[in-house]
Image (cartoon, rainbow, N blue to C red):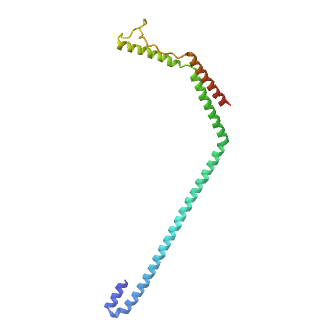
Amino acid sequence: MILNASRRGQRNPSQAKQAAAETRVFARELLRIRKTAARLNTSKAQLNSVAMQVHEAFAVRKIEGSIKASTGIMKDVNALVRLPELTGTMRELSQELVKAGIIEEMVGDSLPDTELEGEDEEAESEVDKVLGEILQGKLGKLGDGKVQELPTAEAPAEEEEEEDEAMLDQMRGRLEAVKS
């Protein structure tokens, strides 16, 4: 509009004074618009800053509520779980588990595995049958139909008994140590 008023004044010299006045009015209006735009931008920035502060305040309140709730929960948990009692209980449980393990070892070592012996006899009879079928009488047979076994070296029974006694004494010592 300023440019149009200026051109009009240049084309028509009789309206030059009026065009100059309009040009000044338009220039003042342009300055006011620029100042207003700058104020609006400043106001917008301030409003955005306030909005962020409000969001921050709400976030801080949420965090405070969460912390209060978790503090209450932690107090309740601490009231329910007493650490000295828990450690004592865990110690007793550990001792009982150790005792149970030692007793299980003693029982397992002192009692013969009767199930395994029965399975061994069955397995031996099956092996004898298979060898009898495959070898078809090439090995000498006993009167009861079993294939002769090669003689094996037997360990003295006294040494085995001494080893078993020593092992039992050792386990009894461990059990007494655990009890005390």
Position of the N terminus, as image quadrant, is bottom left
Locate residue 18: give its quadrant.
Answer: bottom left
Residue 63 horizontal/vertical position (percent):
57, 56
Locate residue 97: give its quadrant.
Answer: top right
Q: Residue furthest right?
A: 180
Indicate left or right for 140 with 180 as reference.
left
- Is the residue 41 above or below the residue 2 in the image? above
Indicate left or right for 53 with 174 as reference.
left
Indicate left or right for 5 with 118 as reference.
left
Whether residue 82 is visible, yes or no, is no
Whether residue 95 is visible, yes or no, is yes
Q: Residue at x 64, y 36 (%)?
A: 91
Residue 99 horizontal/vertical position (percent):
62, 29
Q: Residue furthest left?
A: 11
- Is the residue 43 above or below the residue 115 in the image? below
Q: Nearer the viewer, residue 92 or 40?
A: 92
- Is the residue 146 above or below the residue 11 in the image? above
Position of the C terminus, as image quadrant, is top right
Q: Residue at x 53, y 62 (%)?
A: 55
- Is the residue 66 above or below the residue 119 in the image? below
Residue 67 horizontal/vertical position (percent):
60, 54
Q: Nearer the viewer, residue 51 or 104?
A: 104
Locate residue 150: give its quadrant.
Answer: top left
Q: Residue at x 44, y 17 (%)?
A: 123
Residue 127 horizontal/vertical position (percent):
41, 16
Q: Residue furthest bottom?
A: 14
Q: Nearer the viewer, residue 132 or 30?
A: 132
